[in-house]
Image: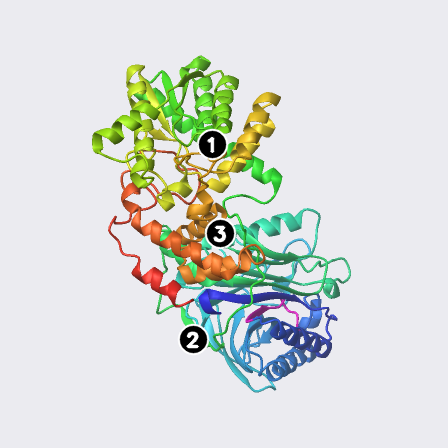
Amino acid sequence: MRDGFVKVAAATPKIRVADCEHNANEIIRLCREAAGLGVKILAFPELCVTGYTCGDLFLQDTLIDAAAGALARIAEETAGLDMLIALGCPVRDQWSGKLYNCAALLNRGKLRGLRPKMALPNYGEFYEQRWFTAGGEGWSGDVTLEGQRFDARIDTDGYFSCDALPDLAVGVEICEDLWAPDPPSTALARAGATVILNLSASNELVGKAAYRRELVKNQSARLHCAYIYADAGEGESSTDLVFAGHDIIAENGTILAESRFKTGLTVSEIDVRRLFFDRRRNTTFTPKKLAEEFWRTPFDLELTDTVLTRPVARSPFVPSEKGERDGRCGEIFAIQTQGLKKRMEHTGSQKLVVGVSGGLDSTLAMLVSAMAARELGLPSDALLAVTMPCFGTTQRTKSNAMLLAEKLGAELRVVDITDSVRQHFKDIGHDENDRSVTYENAQARERTQVLMDIANSINGLVVGTGDLSELALGWATYNGDHMSMYGVNAGVPKTLVRYVVGWYADTCGDAELSAVLNDILATPVSPELLPAENGEISQKTEDLVGPYELHDFFLYYFLRFGMGPGKIYRLAKYVFAGVYDDETILKWLRTFVRRFFAQQFKRSCLPDGPKVGSVALSPRGDWRMPSDAVARAWLDELEALS
């Protein structure tokens, strides 16, 4: 449970209707199996102790007494298990005689509480009001399970809080409660519950599974919570109804695990600290300040490391499924295009000026610029591509830059800046053989000056090419390629730039343009500021600053979920096992942290650019950080891992 990871499970036992002894055996068996897997929170279906489809047998004392005895035995035989167990059981109020459809919460042999169902369906195939009384809002009382040794609170307004991990707070609702207009989980989450358990017996109908899945997923997203939905399965199927055991584990709008038409366990891990971060960041998620009305019952769990099995994307900015990925790329391209169109209309610019290098970023900027000009009804030569060869330019990148401009119908200018840079070296007294940062940055700043002055001369707008990953690392020359009149790639990380260009190559319908784009995709990422070696690129960015797939992974979890470097390192080791060794991951994570803090001053004065995703670094929007913030605490956390 360290780092907020908690292994959870939804369990569907193969029960026998009205056979409480058999059902208790199955429940105990699954509890032990779950414990062996490290599960800490385990949810069973609604009324699983008796079976949901008992009908008028619920009016028989024999069944209710057997259920109480079975519950007592389950508690006794799971006393040595380190987990919180929620299971469905009918409970009779000894004072009124009323029967409640309850979730019983067991922990280390103790009955921690009973949660009655509030929304009792009485339509279609459902007749629950025939047997049960609904738990009323705010209703509570002490209930003794007759014949068996338990005193427990039965209440609708409360949840269960883990002493060892306070972020782990568990609320419970039962089946139809979720389908009601105002689900109890809403109030529970606003009162502090981060995990909602739903004990369900939802029979199967054509199309119902998709609706159920969306209901669970969307509720977890609205409440920034984990939602564990445990459904009755095949043993429950009786007379006219079939149950499919549709178990779902969702976290903040994402399905982590799901099973259907089977019995047994569905297991994954939730991240309660990530949920707390989302609640903290989202100002419209307002807490429900009802401390007097909402009770908290503590339960015990041992604080241990959780073995991860949950899906974690190696490239979190890039959907893994091709259809979804293509849709994402098209959407991003449209957002970039619309942003640039608006800037052109507002400024009255009739020309777009792009410094094209034959690399990925300038290629995407060219494609977006060409589309924006086209949608504004401007001629193709409204796009001016400027290639500016110097010391490190290779024939391959120069040729690709020129071919790209030709295929897009852009006007092309070749401005060789070699003599200008050499004159500048002479002016400032810099030795050309000194290949230090001055040697590199002088070229980047000269290129920016050329672009800006050309734009001024033709009433044009300089389109920036730098991407989100470069902004995070500060991999840009201040007042060089760092500057433009509109940065179309500012919200697109390097790993995603590659896929957007690839998507365009696949969908453009021009074989020659596609060939150029594919060759650009195959070219090593490089600023080409140092002289080529035997005509080949000598300066490869990822050799210098680290693999972009690692840096984009670090960036996503650092910004999107506020994770510290220790937790990011743990996730990276899990995801990149067999790709990078631990030492390599740690090395580049240190680089990321160091550069992210040191280079904030460049981000503090970024040009405008379209936000395309949930992670962005605009100082006017998503990321407000002082330029002189110190990275000591983050680096110290990494040193402790060495």
Instruction: Find numbered disc 3 in the image and state the secondary structure of the residue it sits on.
Output: helix
Residue 47 highlighted magenta (yes or no): yes
* Residue at the limit of the structure toward the left, as seen here: 428
Q: In this view, does 379 lie to the left or right of 100?
A: left
Which amino acid type corresponds to the residue marked 2 in the rendered image?
A: Asp
- The quarter of the picture where the C terminus appears is bottom left
Can the viewer see residue 194 in this picture?
A: no
Q: In this view, does 254 lie to the left or right of 235?
A: left
Q: In the rendered image, which residue does mark 2 sit on?
A: 163
Where is residue 131 drawn, in percent x and y? 63, 67
What is the crowding at mark 1: few (fewer than 14 residues within 10 Å), some, or many (at least 20)?
many
* Residue at the limit of the structure toward the right, as seen here: 239
Circles 1 and 3, Cβ within 8 Å, touching? The answer is: no
The disc placed on residue 359 is 1
Which amino acid type corresponds to the residue marked 3 in the rendered image?
A: Ala
Can the viewer see residue 231 in this picture?
A: yes
What is the crowding at mark 2: few (fewer than 14 residues within 10 Å), some, or many (at least 20)?
some
Residue closer to the observer: 82 or 634: 634
Main secondary-structure element of the magenta-colored stretch: loop
Give the Cα distance between marks 2 and 3. Answer: 26 Å
Residue 52's quadrant in the figure?
bottom right
Where is residue 303 drawn, in percent x and y? 47, 75
Q: Which residue is drawn at 37% across and 64% down?
A: 637
Q: In the rendered image, which residue does mark 3 sit on?
A: 221
